[in-house]
Amino acid sequence: MNASAAPSLRDQTDFRNADRGFVSSLKPCIIKARDGRVIWDNDAYSFLYGAECSETANPKLWRHAQLACKQGLFEVTLGIFQIRGLDLSNMTVIEGDRGVIVVDPLASVECAEAALGLYRHHRGNRKVTGLIYTHSHGDHFGGCQGVLPGKESEGVPILAPEKFLDHAISENIYAGNAMSRRAVYMYGDRLSKGPTGQLGSGIGATVSTGTVSLLPPTIHISRTGQEETIDGVRFVFQITPGTEAPAEMNFHLPQRRALCIAENATHSLHNIATLRGATVRDAISWSMYLDEAIMLFTDHSDVVFSQHLWPVWNQNAIVEFLSEQRDLYAYLHDQTVRMMNDGQTGIEIAENLELPVGLREVWHAQGFYGTVSHNVKAIYQRYMTWFDGSPAHLWEHPPVAAAKRYVSCMGGIDEVIQKARSFTQEGDLRFAVTLLNHAVFADPDNGIAKHELASCFEKLGYGCENGPWRNFYLSGASELRGRKFHTELQPESKAMTSALTLDHLIALLAVRIDGPRAQTENFAIDICVTDLEQRCRLILSNGALIRRVGCLTHTQLLELLATGILPEKVHEQRGDSSLLVKLFSLVVKPNPSFNIVVP
């Protein structure tokens, strides 16, 4: 690698842009839930302010963390403000004729409420006259009831890209438990903040842990060029499905000469597959949509802003920024496919592929959130699945069984630990953790193996340029040392589930059926959801819930799903109601704190 192909630490452009338009900050920047629990503490990052890089941190990640922790109200351009540093994402506020249009109301109700309060303190108590979700990730809609509480949402247009709700539900509800557990590792919100702990996540500090909500969209954006006027403000939309989210959109504000690029271009290489888990993204479509945005909007834009981190001003700088982001995803895609077609596997390509010098020298293309390594593997997976083509990998033993065999072949636990120490001393931490991981999975009670593995994880974490990789390593080390990160089962939140359609509720029920226990049951139940005037039939057959309970309201169905108890007042009940009890006795709740670093 060309050692000179790296961005200059003396370049202060990002610091100037991150401070530009500053109005005021939230003091103290600590946000609490109704029960007094702290769900956001940006002040915990004060150790970064103006400090020299610690020996336990990568210098580039340290610099990026200093930028990402800046918080407060910022003026982007006339009539457009952003609140940054009050959650993982940004909230954008666009001033209209009668009030304000809020774009992406953060991840938590409490943080969104505080962010809007900070805006109103300085700009007046303007009502919310519109709400926009740029895409289907929870940190961009979860706080919606913080800006439109109760009946305030009635009559307010809520805009989102087509199929937003389907993708928001499939990601945050169906797979929500597994993703929530892994997100604890990825964002490191349970780690202590400091030079030996969590520094940030690459696109923000971390994610808040407050109340998650969802208000369904009332206006769907289905095509590029679609225009909507909200409170006197003209929006021109560009749909970008399959990019950073399966349902995502950019928009241009012609009257303000401003382009919102959603999360399709940030000050970091992004994820083709995120470590918390999500649908693998389409790198080449991502690149093409960025090029389309350049052609459609940059001639008429003086600023481009993202829903993470800080904006870019000046037309030339905007074109350069978006072009380099475009090239980033195109190069990763095209070269991965080229090398794949030459017979290399995902792991081999990840080891061999290097970005062009021109991209390695710019700050916004660095791997603070995504990495070349795991993005290449994701592109390979998209085309070739998990299988690398070797028959030896078709039917491997699962981790515990494989670990016991490896340890036995190497002469036992003590010998494995000694060999791992030798590789550690030689600087090969990657192979040391492979050996020690086998030792821990073969004997989860071996304290020496867990201590050695935790120490190696810490050393790897301290050297990481990538925020999520650092957080994964340090979270793994922490849990190996006995600190268990309990994860709440977020999908049970009424503020979230109340937005689910009947189809979503039945699908959520289906993925919680204990198939082995249910396989001998065979019955059908008809449901009439009275307040929605919808009917369906639930058919339990061979352990699968196919679809279609007395007559229930939507609220009663939610209660039944949450508790498994049949509501007392069910109107027009006919047939054998015990089938409902039987059905819900087969529904299991997932374990929100399943093990990751030990079996």
Image (spheres, rainbow, N blue to C red):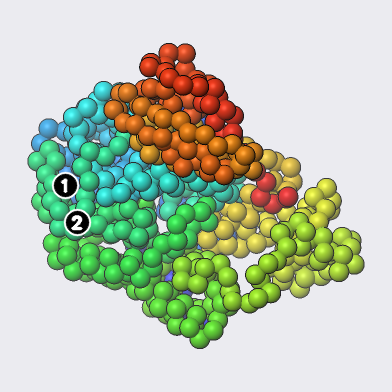
Closest to the observer, 343 or 487: 343
Q: Which residue is more in the foreground, 327 or 289?
A: 289
Is residue 56 toward the left or the right of residue 574 in the image? right
Q: 10 Å neighbourhood of mark 1: few (<14), some, or many (≥20)?
A: few
Q: Which mark is residue 223?
A: 2
Q: Amino acid at mark 2?
A: Arg
Q: In the orientation shown, which residue stands out farthest toward the bottom?
A: 342
Residue 181 pos. (x, y %): 57, 44
Q: 545 or 189, which lies in front?
A: 545
In the figure, residue 394 lies in which quadrant?
bottom right
Dot 1 or dot 2, earlier in sequence: 1
The circle drawn on residue 46 is none
**Residue corresponding to mark 1:** 78
Residue at image coords 58%, 52%:
471
**Is residue 70 rendered to the left or right of residue 189?**
left
Question: In this rendering, would 236 be left or right of 273?
Answer: left
Q: Residues within 10 Å of mark 2 (few under 14, many from 20)?
A: some
Q: Could you tell me if residue 316 is visible in this image?
A: yes
- When the figure is inspected, residue 149 is found, relative to residue 231, above or below; the finding is above
Q: Which dot, 1 or 2, sits closer to the camera?
A: 2
**Measured from the top left, where is residue 427 in percent x and y?**
72, 71
The three-letter amino acid code for the residue at tag 1 is: Leu
In space, the residues marked 1 and 2 are separated at their CA atoms by: 28 Å
Count of residue discs: 2
Residue found at x 15% / y 49%: 235
- Residue 354: where, in percent of width, then height? 49, 78
Q: From what the image shows, is residue 400 above or below residue 102? A: below
Which residue: 14% across, 41% down?
A: 230
Q: Percent position (x, y) of residue 227?
A: 13, 51
Determine if residue 436 is in view: no
